[in-house]
Amino acid sequence: MLKKLLTFVAMLYAATCFAAVDVNKASVAELDSIKGIGPGISAKILDERKKGDFKDWADLVDRVNGVGDRNAAKFSAEGLTVNGEAFKGTTPTAKKADAKQAKAEVATPAASAAKK
C-alpha cells in the first residue's frame, strides 16, 4: 500500500514539473520557473501583458525586448506556451524587417555621396 501511495505521489509530482506554463496566465514565480527566464524578462513580460494578452509567439517576440526567436525556442522547449501553443519556428517580425529596410535606405545615400 505504501509503495502505491509513493508511486502515485511521484507521478503527480512529475506531472506538475512538466506542466506547460502559459505566458498569458503565468505568475512571476511560474515564469521564473522556466529555465532562461529571470526576474528581468519576467518583469518585461508582465509589463507588456498589462497592455493586453499576447496573441501568439510573434506578438511575444515583437513586444518583449530580450526575447528573440532563439530565446522563444528555448523557452518553449522548457514548457512556456502562448495560448497553449508551443513555438514552431522563426517568426517574421515587422520590427526586424523595418530595421533592415531603414539600414538599407541609410546606406544607399551615403554610398552614393561617397562615390561623388
Image: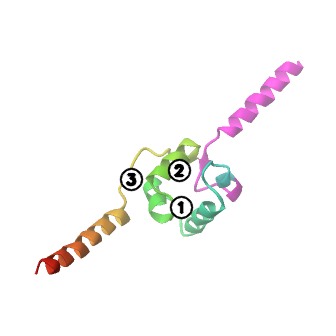
On the question of residue 84 being in view, the answer is: no
For disc 1, the neighbor class at 10 Å (few under 14, some 14 to 19, many from 20) is some
- What residue is disc 3 on? 91
For the residues labelled 2 and 3, the Cα–Cα distance comes to 16 Å
Q: Nearer the viewer, residue 108 or 13?
A: 108
- Which corner quadrant of the image does residue 40 belong to? bottom right
User: Is residue 30 among what the camera can see?
Assistant: yes
The circle drawn on residue 9 is none
Quadrant holding the C terminus: bottom left
From the image, tell me which residue sits under label 1. 53
The span picked out in magenta is: 1-29
| Residue at 53 percent of width and 61 percent of height | 53
Q: Is residue 51 above or below residue 22?
A: below
Residue 60 location, x and y as percent?
49, 59
Q: Position of residue 87 (x, y in %)?
A: 47, 46
7 w.r.t. 54: above or below: above
**Is 16 one of the magenta-colored residues?**
yes
Residue 11 falls left or right of residue 77 = right
**Amino acid at circle 1:** Asp
Q: Position of residue 108 (x, y in %)?
A: 19, 73
Specify the label residue 83 is tagged with: 2
Disc nearer the start of the sequence (2/3): 2
Q: Earlier in the sequence, mark 2 or mark 1?
A: 1
Q: Amino acid at mark 2?
A: Asn
Indicate whether 44 appears above or below 14.
below
